[in-house]
Image (tube, helix red, strand yellow):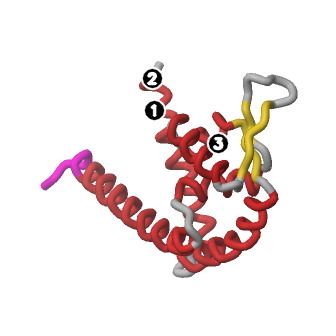
Amino acid sequence: MPDTTTLLTQKSMHLHSVFAKSFKSISEHAVAGIKAAGFNPTAFAVMEVLYHKGAQPIQQIGAKLLLQSGNVTYVIDKLEDKGYLFRHPCPQDRRIIHAELTEEGRKIMDNIYPDYARQIDRAYSGMSQEEMEQLINLLKKLGRSAESLSSSTHK
């Protein structure tokens, strides 16, 4: 008979697999529409941050999206070349560069974001509002726990 530690490890591995597969399925469903609109998921994520948060320091965009700064710079370069965003120095600290949507970028997001939101809503339609709330709370708990483990190992 397997010991409790082995059973817990097996359960953790199963949960990790189910979580990863679910996230992949939901993400693929959600990005189908944005790909059709000509965006890759990273470019859309940058646009989404700026759409909801307004002008942001480029370094903070990367941190919010869990991206390396070089990747963010590359994506921002491409979006700037297309006229969807522009950069400008922070008025308080010129070493900090902000990215902000142009009027064209805002119009595109006004056009494609509602469909994206519907795709997300559709992806989660298999759950009740109560189940979604439970899952949100459980994932927050899991994230906080993993983060505390991670920060304690880096000390």
Badge nearest the viewer, 3 or 1: 3
Image quarter hosting the N terminus: bottom left
Rendered residue at 54%/54% (across/down): 42
Which amino acid, mark 1? Ser
Regarding residue 131, the answer to whether it shows in the image is no
| 124 relative to 52 in the view: left or right | left
* Badge 2 vs badge 1, beta-carbon distance below 8 Å: yes
| 3 relative to 44 in the view: left or right | left
In the rendering, at what x and y percent does residue 154 appear?
45, 23
Rendered residue at 73%/32% (across/down): 97
Numbered circle sitting on residue 150 = 1
Name the residue nearer the viewer: 13 or 99: 99
In the rendering, at what x and y percent does residue 119 appear?
59, 76
Rendered residue at 86%/25% (across/down): 92
Which amino acid, mark 3? Ile
Q: Residues within 10 Å of mark 1 (few under 14, many from 20)?
A: few
In the rendering, at what x and y percent does residue 108 appear?
72, 67
- For label 2, the residue is 154
Judge whether residue 5 is colored magenta.
yes
Bounds of the magenta segment: 1-6
Numbered circle sitting on residue 56 = none
Q: Tag 2, which secondary structure?
A: loop
Name the residue nearer the viewer: 88 or 128: 88
In the rendering, at what x and y percent does residue 24 appear?
42, 64
* Badge 3 vs badge 1, beta-carbon distance below 8 Å: no
The answer to whether 72 is drawn above or below residue 122 in the figure is: above
- For label 3, the residue is 61
* Badge 2 vs badge 3, beta-carbon distance below 8 Å: no
Q: Residues within 10 Å of mark 2 (few under 14, many from 20)?
A: few
Rendered residue at 53%/76% (across/down): 123
